[in-house]
């Protein structure tokens, strides 16, 4: 498998190159030079396969510089039962029916109780695999609007030969999210930026492209700009699709299903689009955003207007200039009409988000977090009558301060999170200034 940049200036790269570079030298995002295809035999029976079997089959299409035996060991370790718990036979991503045609795929059973655990755990182990061969040291810089930072911190903690720097916007993540990404220490350094997520993302990209600081390629990214983070997010689309086929007792090739995807930086939706590209017969995608609706606006008007993000209760989706939109444009040859044939863009406001949480809880006894609520509301508003799988991205306790007043009761804190809340925050506060960030990185 060969990769090239969305900006067309870099090509001929293997998966290892893409993984460690993160961002292409020309500023573009890496994509496969040619889209692979799954064989018909796999598509005819994948609903009977385990998550690990699906991950190996899909993963080996994109990774040919790791022997299959080693890749299987990486996958088994990343998605082991010890890490993903409380989800029974459907681990690590159980499917729950909440209405006649809407199913929630719970992606929050990992160590930090957010879907970012899938990408972070896989990526850390793949990087560790390559670094053991070269004995080099790598520095990871990642921007987060919430859950990416905690998942990366947990996934990379104490991984040999790797140092991690997490940039997060001051006052714009939940208390639990902040505790999760600032209490590790060791090889994890949290940097609190006086700005918005888009500022953090811009700073991270500047470091990756800085010839003086990163001239020897010592820095890489663990954001979804890195294809190595994006790839494992494809796995649970196949798994959710297969789980629904089993629940309905329908052959997977005869199933009509769409996905509603809560979207901020659009890595998750891009992963789904790539699943469709390689053969998973998804009918439609719902790009579900909060009031930061630059992509739904593009799908409706054909005009892309990036802007400063607005703060909402679904903070991980507060992105005004999503990085992965470049990959979406690449997949659809910069054609808005072509993209709109596969994707329905729906924006959900704060009142609708809260009302959906309250109604679903009242009618079904099922508690959504603020991000998953956006996806469910968008699914309801989509007009799609066939089955919809709505991706549920975080345990509601991570946003309990917002949710508890809505439902009028306390949310129990899982044991794995109680210890985190008692730890001391350790973060370096900086202004939104590239020179100040460079100084911090040199000293740490």
Image (cartoon, rainbow, N blue to C red):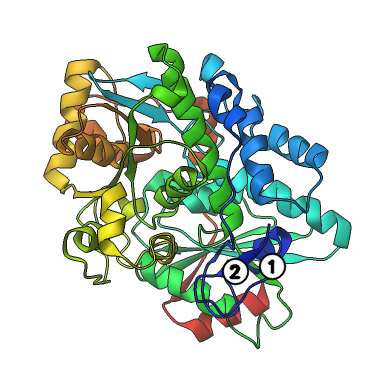
Q: Which mark is residue 4?
A: 2
Q: Residue at x 53, y 52 (%)?
A: 230
Q: Is residue 225 left or right of residue 193?
A: right
Q: In this view, does 10 lie to the left or right of 382?
A: right
Quadrant placement of the C terminus: bottom right
* Mark 1 and mark 2 residues within 8 Å of each other at the beta carbon: yes
Q: Is residue 358 left or right of residue 15?
A: left
Q: Mark 1 points at which residue?
A: 13
Residue 175 in sight from this viewpoint: yes
Determine whether 267 is above or below 141 in the image: above
Q: Which residue is drawn at 42% across and 11% down?
A: 249
Closer to us: 169 or 322: 322
Q: Residue 60 carries which label?
A: none
SS under mark 1:
loop
Q: Residue furthest front?
A: 40
Quadrant placement of the N terminus: bottom right
Q: In which quarter of the image is residue 212?
A: bottom right
Residue 207 image point, x, y percent: 57, 77
């Amino acid at each position: 498998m060969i990769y090239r940049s969305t900006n067309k200036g870099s090509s001929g790269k293997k998966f290892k190159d893409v993984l460690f570079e993160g961002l292409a030298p020309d500023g573009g995002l890496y994509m496969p030079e040619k889209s692979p295809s799954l064989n018909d035999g796999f598509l005819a029976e994948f609903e009977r396969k385990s998550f690990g079997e699906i991950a190996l089959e899909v993963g080996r299409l994109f990774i040919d510089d790791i022997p299959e035996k080693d890749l299987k060991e990486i996958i088994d370790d990343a998605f082991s039962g010890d890490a993903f718990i409380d989800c029974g036979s459907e681990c690590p991503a159980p499917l729950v029916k909440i209405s006649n045609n809407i199913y929630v795929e719970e992606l929050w059973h990992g160590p930090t109780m957010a879907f970012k655990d899938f990408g972070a755990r896989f990526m850390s182990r793949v990087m560790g695999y390559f670094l053991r061969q070269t004995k080099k040291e790598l520095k990871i810089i990642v921007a987060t609007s919430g859950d990416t930072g905690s998942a990366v911190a947990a996934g990379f903690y104490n991984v040999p030969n790797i140092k991690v720097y997490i940039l997060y916007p001051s006052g714009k993540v939940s208390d639990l999210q902040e505790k999760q990404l600032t209490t590790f220490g060791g090889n994890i350094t949290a940097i609190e930026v006086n700005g918005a997520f888009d500022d953090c993302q811009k700073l991270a990209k500047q470091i990756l492209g800085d010839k003086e600081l990163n001239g020897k390629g010592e820095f890489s990214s663990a954001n979804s700009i890195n294809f190595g983070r994006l790839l494992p997010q494809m796995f649970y689309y196949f798994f959710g699709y297969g789980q629904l086929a089993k629940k309905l007792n329908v052959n997977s090739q005869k199933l009509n299903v769409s996905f509603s995807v809560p979207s901020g930086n659009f890595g998750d939706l891009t992963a789904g689009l790539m699943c469709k590209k390689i053969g998973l017969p998804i009918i439609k995608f719902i790009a579900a955003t909060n009031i930061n609706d630059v992509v739904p606006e593009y799908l409706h008007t054909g005009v892309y207007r990036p802007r400063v993000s607005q703060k909402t209760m679904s903070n991980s989706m507060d992105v005004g200039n999503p990085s992965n939109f470049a990959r979406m444009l690449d997949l659809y040859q910069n054609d808005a009409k072509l993209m709109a044939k596969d994707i329905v863009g729906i924006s959900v406001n704060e009142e609708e988000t809260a009302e959906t949480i309250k109604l679903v809880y009242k009618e079904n006894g099922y508690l959504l977090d603020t991000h998953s609520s956006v996806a469910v509301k968008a699914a309801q508003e989509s007009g799609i009558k066939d089955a919809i799988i709505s991706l549920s991205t975080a345990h509601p306790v991570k946003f309990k301060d917002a949710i508890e007043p809505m439902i009028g009761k306390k949310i129990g804190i899982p044991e794995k999170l109680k210890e985190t809340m008692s730890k001391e925050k350790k973060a370096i506060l900086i202004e939104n200034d590239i020179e100040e960030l460079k100084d911090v990185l040199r000293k740490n």
